[in-house]
Image (cartoon, helix red, strand yellow):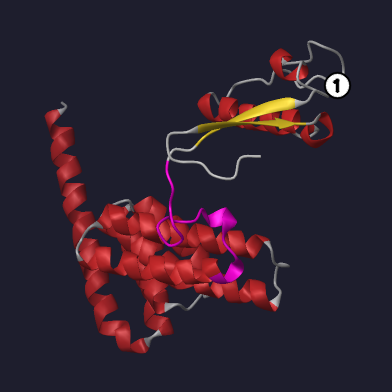
């Protein structure tokens, strides 16, 4: 049995048939995933060797056989020198990762590195969604996770607004406001994003809801509504000029 390997070395291991029963199924799954990722319209191959076929003749020949596995040692990394894949993390590690990603996203946003900030926020949101999948919907733990997503969705949406990707911002802000209908930041940002999409009436509705949810914002809302009306008038004037040039 091999007990020591150095980077660049290769080892071979023989595995008896009883210990390899799941290999062909696993290999088939990985191949199918790669095929679908490479070609969304790909069709998994049908049986060529009977009803128990994997759909791959080379794998079918390995079924029930003892196998030799080869391992190449490319490098050695000590604990703390590599980043764990999210799916290998414990629940506590995932929670800590979310906090870390949010802080990184905030820093990059302040530095106006919007693409990098977007990546951090998106990864944090995805990590929370993985945690939520393990919980019963509407349970205490599930609700806690959903509440943790709100500030991240708000931050992500602000990045989208800065990048002028207003429709994406609206989509995520809808999620925020479905959970917290009177969220002040959510209403402000969705009103802004709706205006960016030229959803004029929706933008006005959000500005008015903001004034209702927080009366201290009424003066701001009045200014924003006036700015929106002026933008609409300017766009209509520009459109009329374009039409004149067509005739």
Residue 116 is one of the magenta-drawn residues? no
Which residue is farthest bottom? 216
32 and 186: which is toward the camera: 32
Looking at the rendered structure, the number of numbered marks drawn on it comes to 1
For mark 1, give the secondary structure.
Answer: loop
Quarter residue 139 falls in: bottom right
235 and 63: which is toward the camera: 63
166 and 94: which is toward the camera: 94
Residue located 53% across and 66% down the image: 94
Q: Determine which residue is flagged by label 1.
A: 52
Near mark 1 (Cα within 10 A), the count class, few <14, some 14-19 or many ≥20, is few
The answer to whether residue 127 is left or right of residue 56 is left
The answer to whether residue 37 is left or right of residue 165 is right
In the figure, 89 relative to 216: above or below?
Answer: above
Residue 85 is one of the magenta-drawn residues? yes
- Which segment is the magenta one? 75-92
In the figure, 145 relative to 121: above or below?
Answer: below
Quadrant the N terminus occupies: top right
Residue located 66% across and 60% down the image: 133
* Residue 200 in view here: no
In the figure, 114 relative to 183: above or below?
Answer: above
- Residue 170 picture location, percent across and down: 42, 58
The answer to whether residue 175 is left or right of residue 170 is right
Quarter residue 82 falls in: bottom left
* Residue 81 in view here: yes
């Amino acid at each position: 049995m091999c007990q020591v390997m150095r980077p660049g070395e290769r080892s071979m291991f023989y595995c008896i048939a009883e210990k390899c029963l799941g290999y062909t199924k696993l290999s088939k799954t990985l191949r199918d995933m790669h095929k679908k990722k490479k070609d969304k319209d790909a069709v998994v191959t049908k049986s060529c060797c009977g009803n128990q076929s994997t759909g791959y003749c080379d794998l079918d020949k390995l079924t029930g056989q003892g196998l030799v596995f080869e391992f190449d040692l490319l490098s050695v990394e000590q604990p703390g020198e590599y980043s764990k894949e999210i799916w290998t993390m414990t629940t506590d590690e995932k929670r800590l990762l979310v906090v870390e990603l949010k802080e990184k996203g905030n820093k990059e946003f302040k530095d106006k590195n919007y693409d990098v900030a977007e990546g951090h926020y998106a990864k944090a949101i995805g990590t929370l969604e993985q945690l939520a999948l393990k919980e019963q919907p509407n349970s205490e733990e599930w609700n806690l996770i959903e509440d943790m997503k709100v500030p991240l969705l708000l931050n992500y949406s602000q990045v989208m607004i800065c990048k002028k990707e207003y429709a994406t911002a609206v989509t995520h802000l809808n999620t925020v406001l479905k959970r917290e209908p009177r969220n002040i930041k959510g209403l402000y940002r969705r009103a802004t994003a709706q205006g960016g999409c030229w959803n004029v009436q929706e933008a006005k509705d959000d500005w008015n809801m903001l004034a209702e949810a927080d009366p201290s914002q009424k003066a701001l809302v009045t200014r924003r509504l006036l700015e929106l009306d002026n933008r609409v008038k300017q766009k209509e004037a520009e459109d009329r000029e374009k039409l004149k040039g067509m005739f």
